[in-house]
Structure formats: structure tokens, C-alpha cells
Image (cartoon, helix red, strand yellow):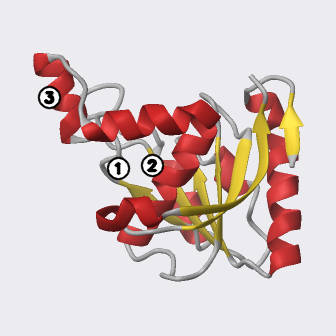
């Protein structure tokens, strides 16, 4: 496992290289990557992989606004990348209730628990279930998930994802890399 001294986009190039190396070693063909701009997902092109790019849902930062430019989305699709823009597994109705009424709810407790390992690891687990639920990755196969802390990528895992209705069956098989801080 590679540990980065600090989190952030400066680790993206190394995270991508480590994920690609591990995918090759394990014969993994499915990559799920969190990317709102598409730039991180683009770095996996040309490696004969099934790439799923998971974005923030429309309205995440601003009502009605899609953070991924239409040109970027089209470019990824033309390269065979599946782009998944949907409600985040751990940021749906529970978060709306918290914003409206206060308190803490089960999905947010799970998300906070996963953040013990870092924001990127939490997102890796989340996007893996989201891609599986959408039928964009096969059930019962290990995949590699890549995410980050803010922009870029600084975390990658080998995971056997579970559907959201069986969330606690998710299994992180390996942490390929993550930041220490």
C-alpha cells in the first residue's frame, strides 16, 4: 500500500498509475472513478478497461446545475466511458432531513464511519455500490475504485461491491493507496 503524506490532487498521477498496475496484476477489467470534470476518468483511457465515471448529482453544489460540462460528458461517452450522474448513496434523503430538521441519520453515520479511513476511501465504497446498482459493473467481481479528497484522486481500493440494499456486504479487499492526512 502506498501512503501519501498529504491528500489532494497532486497525488492523482501516482494514484492512477498504482490503480492501473494493480488492475493488470489482478486481471481486473472494471474501474469506477469519481470525477466531476472528467479529467481523472480520462487518465484511464487506452487501457482496455470498462471505465465508469461517477459524478456529483445535478444540483449538488447549485440547484439545477450539472458540474460536468456537456462537452466533457460527450467526450467520455465517445471514448466508451459510462458516466453515472445520480443521487449519492450516502447523501440522499437522510441529508435532506438533517439539513431541514437537524440530527444525524443512519447513512450519515455510515459515511462518517468510513471517513475514519479518509474521504477518498469513503467515496470509493459509495461509488462502487452506485455503479453496481446502476448495472454498470458486474455483480460478484472485484473492481478497482478511485476517488479523492476534493479534486483529483488520492485513494484507490480493490473492492467487491455490494448493492445498496446489501451495503454491509461490501468488501474492501485491498487499499492500493491513500493519504496519511
Crowd band around label 2 with a 10 angstrom C-alpha radius: few (<14), some (14–19), many (20+): few
* Residue in the foreground of this view, choosing between 17 and 143: 143
Left or right: 37 with respect to 56? right
Q: Residue at x 83, y 64 (%)?
A: 20
Q: Position of residue 125 (x, y in %)?
A: 53, 53
Q: Residue at x 70, y 76 (%)?
A: 49
Crowd band around label 3 with a 10 angstrom C-alpha radius: few (<14), some (14–19), many (20+): few
Label 2, label 1: how many angstroms apart (C-alpha)? 23 Å
Residue 59, compared with residue 103, is above or below; it is: below
The answer to whether residue 118 is seen in the rendering is no
| Residue that extends furthest to the top in the rendered view of this protein | 102
Left or right: 71 with respect to 102? right
Q: Residue at x 30, y 25 (%)?
A: 62
Label 2, label 3: how many angstroms apart (C-alpha)? 31 Å
Crowd band around label 1 with a 10 angstrom C-alpha radius: few (<14), some (14–19), many (20+): some
The answer to whether residue 170 is seen in the rendering is yes
Q: Residue at x 82, y 77 (%)?
A: 26
Identify the image quadrant of residue 9. top right
* Marks 3 & 1, CB-CB < 8 Å contact: no
Give whichever of discs 3 and 1 has the lower sequence position. Answer: 1
The residue that mark 3 highlights is 97
The residue that mark 2 highlights is 70
The residue that mark 1 highlights is 89
* Residue in the foreground of this view, choosing between 180 and 68: 180
Determine whether the residue tagged by mark 3 lies in a helix, strand or loop.
Answer: helix
Residue 93, compared with residue 7, is above or below; it is: below
Identify the image quadrant of residue 144. bottom right
Residue 163, compared with residue 176, is above or below; it is: below
Q: How many marks?
A: 3
Amino acid at each position: 500500500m502506498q501512503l501519501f503524506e498529504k491528500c489532494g490532487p497532486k497525488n492523482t498521477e501516482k494514484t492512477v498509475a498504482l490503480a492501473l498496475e494493480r488492475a493488470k496484476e489482478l486481471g481486473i477489467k472494471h474501474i469506477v472513478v469519481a470525477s466531476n470534470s472528467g479529467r481523472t476518468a480520462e487518465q484511464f483511457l487506452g487501457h482496455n478497461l470498462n471505465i465508469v465515471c461517477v459524478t456529483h448529482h445535478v444540483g449538488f453544489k447549485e440547484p439545477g446545475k450539472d458540474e460536468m460540462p456537456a462537452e466533457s460528458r460527450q467526450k467520455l461517452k465517445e471514448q466508451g466511458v459510462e458516466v453515472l450522474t445520480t443521487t449519492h448513496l450516502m447523501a440522499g434523503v437522510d441529508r435532506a432531513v438533517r439539513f431541514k430538521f437537524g440530527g444525524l441519520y443512519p447513512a450519515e453515520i455510515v459515511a462518517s464511519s468510513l471517513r475514519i479511513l479518509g474521504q477518498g476511501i469513503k467515496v470509493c465504497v459509495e461509488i462502487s455500490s452506485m455503479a453496481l446498482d446502476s448495472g454498470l459493473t458486474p455483480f460478484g467481481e472485484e473492481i478497482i475504485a478511485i476517488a479523492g479528497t476534493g479534486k483529483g484522486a488520492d485513494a484507490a481500493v480493490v473492492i467487491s461491491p455490494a448493492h445498496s440494499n446489501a451495503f454491509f456486504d461490501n468488501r474492501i479487499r485491498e487499499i492500493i493507496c491513500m493519504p496519511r492526512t
